[in-house]
Every structure is written in C-alpha cells, then in structure tokens.
Image (spheres, rainbow, N blue to C red):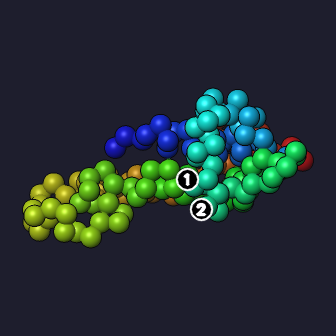
C-alpha cells in the first residue's frame, strides 16, 4: 500500500494544525510554511478536511483554519480516509468491499494475508492520534503550554 502525495500532505497539514492548536485560526500561508506543503495544494486539501468536520475555517483578516477537536481526539485514520479513501491493500479486502470484485474470492488462499494486512493498517491508523504524533516527534502540545 502506498500513500499518495495528497495523503502525505494532508497529514502534514493536520500535524501543523495540531502543533498550533489553541492559538485560534491559522492562516493557510502559516500552515503551508510549517508543513512544507505548497500553498496552492494546501488550499485544495482543506475543503475535504472541512467537509469531513476535521477542521473549521474562519473568514476575514484574522481568519484561517483550526482543528475542529483537540489533537488527542483526532485519529490519523480519519485523516487518511478523507485524503485516500477506504483502507484497501487489495480491492477484494477494501473497507468498502462488496466481496464480488474477484471471481476467486471464495476459497482464495491469499486473501487471508491481505485481510490481516488491512486490519493491521486499520489498527495503527485508528489507534494513533495527532497528539500521539506530536508526542513521538517531541513537540509540546499547545494545551500543555497553556
């Protein structure tokens, strides 16, 4: 399974917002600089993140984006699915699979390994929060410094 640029950049942007959590709306230019995501690309990524309820936006001179929930309440899996879609190392084991994508699905000897891979990926994505990423990277949480 390979994560696209969209997934990587979306995750970076969300980590930047997590680092700056509690400081109010963050301008896109600040997020772009902190996350090393091109501004034009970042603009495209924020709409699906906003629609998914992961970020909120504020218009105006002091506007920008901020996390809709604290970093410890935003799971990496939520971001991944907005950016990449369902977890699917193989189409026949996609989270949204209808199980009729392959004529060999019944009795398939290899499907079990792809199901285990999918489930392992889901477990990691859904048990990791933005706060966990910040902690692992050694960043102070905004809420700890207040």
- Give the secondary structure at mark 1: helix
The residue shown at (58%, 37%) is 41
Rendering quarter of residue 137: top right
Q: Which mark is residue 79?
A: 1
Q: Foreground residue, 59 or 66?
A: 59
Residue 30 lies, in percent from the top left, at 75, 34
Instruction: Classify 10 Å Cα crowding around label 1: few (below 14), some (14-19), many (20 and above).
Output: many
- Give the secondary structure at mark 2: loop
The residue shown at (61%, 36%) is 40
The residue shown at (71%, 46%) is 18
The residue shown at (27%, 70%) is 98
Sequence-wise, which precedes: disc 2 or disc 1? 2
In front of the other: label 2 or label 1? 2
- Number of on-image labels: 2
Residue 129 in view here: yes
Report how far apart the C-alphas of labels 2 and 1 lie in the structure.
9 Å
Residue 91 lies, in percent from the top left, at 26, 56
Q: Which mark is residue 52?
A: 2
The N terminus lies in quadrant: top left
Above or below, comparing residue 33 to residue 16 in the picture: above
Residue 125 in view here: no
Q: Which mark is residue 37?
A: none
Q: Foreground residue, 108 or 24?
A: 24
Residue 104 lies, in percent from the top left, at 9, 62
Above or below, comparing residue 88 to residue 139 in the picture: below
């Amino acid at each position: 399974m390979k994560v696209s640029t969209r997934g990587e950049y979306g995750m970076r942007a969300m980590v930047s917002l997590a680092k700056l959590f509690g400081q109010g709306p963050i301008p896109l230019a600040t997020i772009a600089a902190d996350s090393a995501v091109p501004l034009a690309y970042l603009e495209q990524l924020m709409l699906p993140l906003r629609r998914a309820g992961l970020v909120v936006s504020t218009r105006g001179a002091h506007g920008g984006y901020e996390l809709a929930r604290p970093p410890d309440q935003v799971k990496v899996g939520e971001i991944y699915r907005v950016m990449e879609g369902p977890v699917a190392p193989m189409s026949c084991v996609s989270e949204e699979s209808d199980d009729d994508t392959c004529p060999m699905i019944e009795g398939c000897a290899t499907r079990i390994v792809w199901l285990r891979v999918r489930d392992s990926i889901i477990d990691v994505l859904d048990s990791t929060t933005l706060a966990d990423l910040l902690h692992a990277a050694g960043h102070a949480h905004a809420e700890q410094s207040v």
